[in-house]
Amino acid sequence: MSRSKLRIDSLVIHGGQAPDPSTGAVMPPISLASTYAQESPGQHKGFEYTRSHNPTRYALERSIAAIEGSSLSQRQDVTSGGFAFSSGLAAMATCLELLDTGDHVVAMDDLYGGSYRLMSRVRERSMGLNVTYVDMTDAKRVEQAITPRTKMIWIETPTNPTLKLIDLKAITAIAQSRAAKGQKIITVCDNTFATPILQRPLEYGFDIVHHSATKYLGGHSDALGGLLVTNRAEIAEKLRFMQNAIGSVLSPFDSYLVLRGIKTLALRMQRHCQSAARIAEWLVKHPKVQRVVYPGLPSHPQHSLAGQQMRIGDEPAYGGMITMFLKGGLGESRQFLENVQVFALAESLGGVESLIEHPAIMTHASVPPENRAKLGISDTLVRISVGIEDVRDLIADLDQALESVSISPVPKTRETAARGSP
Ligand SMILES: Cc1ncc(COP(=O)(O)O)c(C=O)c1O
């Protein structure tokens, strides 16, 4: 069977990969050399300097291109459609370089705090980008925000941390109708939360998929990385140029770690989704929990959209992230978070181990308080990244931590979050 026809569970293992031609090694060697010997000036085997070309990074880039379904993934040359960077934000920063000074971007209003910070506090100043942040749960608002200078639509679905969904088909329909009138708008989807196991935005017509590979793709909380994937040859060429020109490439060692993580991505995502669904259902019934947001719950306002665009095979699959609101205030949230034992109170997500955090103080502190209030990122919002431990141990841990919380009729602390974030 041709490798290009493989199903997703096989693609994560074989997509874009072949045994090393010189030794037959089934995993690519970690190729650490920073430079490569040339036979004569300009005559070499395709590798000159590791920022420009690295075999281990190429192996990862071909893998993600195949898994996200890039039509360029069969190419063996430098435009395989996948690009690896030193972090998710480095990937985003390079992607924004596709734009020119004064261009306009329509972005989701509920982005990862660091993505919002990069646009609003760096690129708006340094590139003169104009960014309009809109709640894209209603695609009409995207249409209304587009101006003649709009060159990019940047989305994240499900969003971090409020788990809102954006209708992928509706966004590409808007970009296609503008393209028919001569306005080219690059559509980018941050697919970090869903991963290509659940949703493949290129299949919906998106131009670029973005990932923080630090999360589910790496999967073991031991590597930082970012990825971009495209279907479009002209974008691939520009990204390859910029990746080398800007230089925030992924190291060979981290490329190897992410590639190794991807091999078990399909299996891990199944477990993340199953356990998260069970925990969300359990939390809904807990008397100390005000509200649970999980795309798999019928109470989620976009439950039916989630069932259509987030799937493993023929079955809906809603991801491994849960957002919950505790009863009480910041004091109660602190008590709860200080008492978890199996969950680690830590930033990040998508690892094999379960993590829990407080976005207003931790991951989203870089979002101004007034925006956080508008988005509902309150002091009682707790974000959970469900790992692959036995789900009964996870529920028991949450249970004992909730047990330790005494809900006071008067909020325990009026403190609100105000500090930097990663
Ligand atoms: C959805 C999303 N996108 C992008 C990023 C940034 O990735 P990195 O931390 O690898 O730079 C994160 C990090 O948490 C994220 O959650």
Image: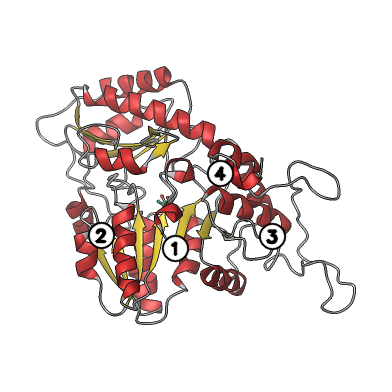
Identify the residue position indicated by label 2 in the image.
368
Three-letter code, disc 3? Gln
Tag nearer the camera, 2 or 1? 1
Task: Identify the image quadrant of the N terminus.
Answer: top right
Q: Position of residue 187 (x, y in %)?
A: 39, 64
Tag nearer the camera, 4 or 1? 1
Identify the coloring: secondary structure
Q: How packed is label 4: few (under 14 Cα within 10 Å), some, or many (20 or more)? A: many
- State the separation of the CA atoms marked 1 and 3: 20 Å
Which secondary structure lies at badge 4?
A: loop
**Residue 67, above or below 48:** above
* Residue that appears at 45% across and 55% down: 202
Identify the residue position indicated by label 4 in the image.
218
| Mark 2 vs 1, N-terminal side | 1
| Mark 4 vs 1, N-terminal side | 1
Is 373 left or right of 178, judged from the image as shown? left
Identify the residue position indicated by label 1 in the image.
207
* Residue that appears at 50% across and 68% down: 94
Q: Position of residue 330 (x, y in %)?
A: 22, 39
- State the separation of the CA atoms marked 4 and 1: 23 Å
| Mark 1 vs 3, N-terminal side | 3
Are discs 1 and 3 less than 8 Å apart at CB? no
Task: Identify the image quadrant of the C terminus.
Answer: bottom left
Tag nearer the camera, 3 or 2? 3
Judge by depth and name the residue closer to the eye, 325 or 169: 169
Q: How packed is label 1: few (under 14 Cα within 10 Å), some, or many (20 or more)? A: many
